Amino acid sequence: MDSVILDAELLPLMASAPVFVLSNEILAPMRANGLGVAPSLSDAVERTDHVVSTDPHVVVRVHRPRNVEGLLPLVYSVHGGGFVFGSRSMDDAKFDRWCPRFGCVGVSVEYRLAPETPYPGPLEDCYAGLLWTWEHREELGIDASTVIIAGVSAGGGLAAGLALLARDRGEVPVTHQLLECPMIDDRQVTSSSQLDGLPVWSRDSNTFGWRAYLGDLYGTDAIPGYAAPTRADDLVGLPPGMVIVGGADGFRDEDIAYALRLNQSGVPTELHVLPGAPHGVQMFAGTAVAELWATLVEQWLARVLSR
């Protein structure tokens, strides 16, 4: 079986990368410890939390650049974490950059986590947050003409499922989708998903995440496209967008295939595959490949948000 080929600049840095295989035993301490030291937050952005629902408990965090008047485009973000860990605060640093730079409102949703809450709970939480944001767009100062949904890893998978759900329910007019290394195929049958030595997010961790998220559906043919978007039969009418993934990421092939299907379905979709980039390459700030990733994402956002 082929092994991972990493960008040469990353090789000496991999010693500091998280090394783990997700399991029930390490999930609780992983959640308790979080993802390291919280970044210092910018005074240029105002953040407010809003309870969308009490049963189930769903919260969104709204980020808005200070001293900016008028209606601003929306970026609605779903955090990553393999469906089993993470929180809305993971998007704080991102929106500290994006809100002042692009003049946008950023909203991050806190959804219930698997395995305690399997599909469809987390996706419905994401939808509830999106619907609440849309219904409160005037008081939040949101320009209804630009509604971008975005997500990284499992958050990218939830964002892709959310795009399908929003299209089919017809309540929120999503205009674009930004999918960064999205986790979208539970079957793990692609060549990249079977690579040996996958850093950061291994085959075993991927299996654990999907088992937790799908619950009793895992391993069956009853899994809908909302849960695993590569299973969706019809991609027509989805919002245009961007898919970006690393060449050393187990999600590489499923993400390439999804972007191809979107384009074939008449959905203009920009695709970037960065050779040698592993899953979570954004963690390696300062490296050329991580900087390229950030540049490509922000160039796409700049084009969309300037329209």
Image (cartoon, rainbow, N blue to C red):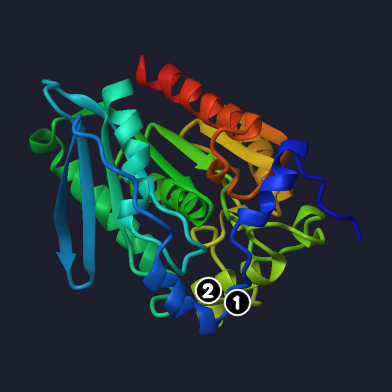
Q: Nearer the viewer, residue 28 or 183?
A: 28
Location of residue 190 in the rendering, given as x and y in whole percent from the top left corner: 78, 56
In the image, 174: left or right of 266?
left
> Neighbour class for label 2 at 10 Å: few (<14), some, many (≥20)?
many
Cα–Cα gap, marks 1 and 2:
5 Å
Q: Residue at x 16, y 24 (%)?
A: 71
Query: Label 2 belongs to which residue?
Result: 214
The quadrant of the image that shows the N terminus is bottom right
Answer left or right for 71 relative to 32: left
- The front one of 207 and 282 is 282
- Mark 1 is surrounded, within 10 Å at the Cα level, by few (under 14), some (14 to 19) or many (20 or more) other residues, namely some
Quarter of the figure with the C terminus: top left
Of residues 267 and 79, the one drawn nearer to the viewer in this rendering = 79
x, y percent for residue 296: 55, 25
In the rendered image, residue 69, in percent from the top left (x then y), is placed at: 11, 20
Tell which residue pokes out farthest to the left in this image: 139
The residue at which mark 1 appears reads as: 218
* Residue at the image position 29 percent from the left and 43 percent from the top: 40
Residue 200 seen in the figure: yes
Q: Secondary structure at mark 1?
A: loop
Could you tell me residue 160's position as x and y percent? Answer: 49, 48
Q: Quadrant of residue 72?
A: top left
* For the residues bearing labels 1 and 2, Cβ distance under 8 angstroms: yes
Q: Compared with residue 33, is residue 258 higher up or lower down, i.e. above or below?
A: above
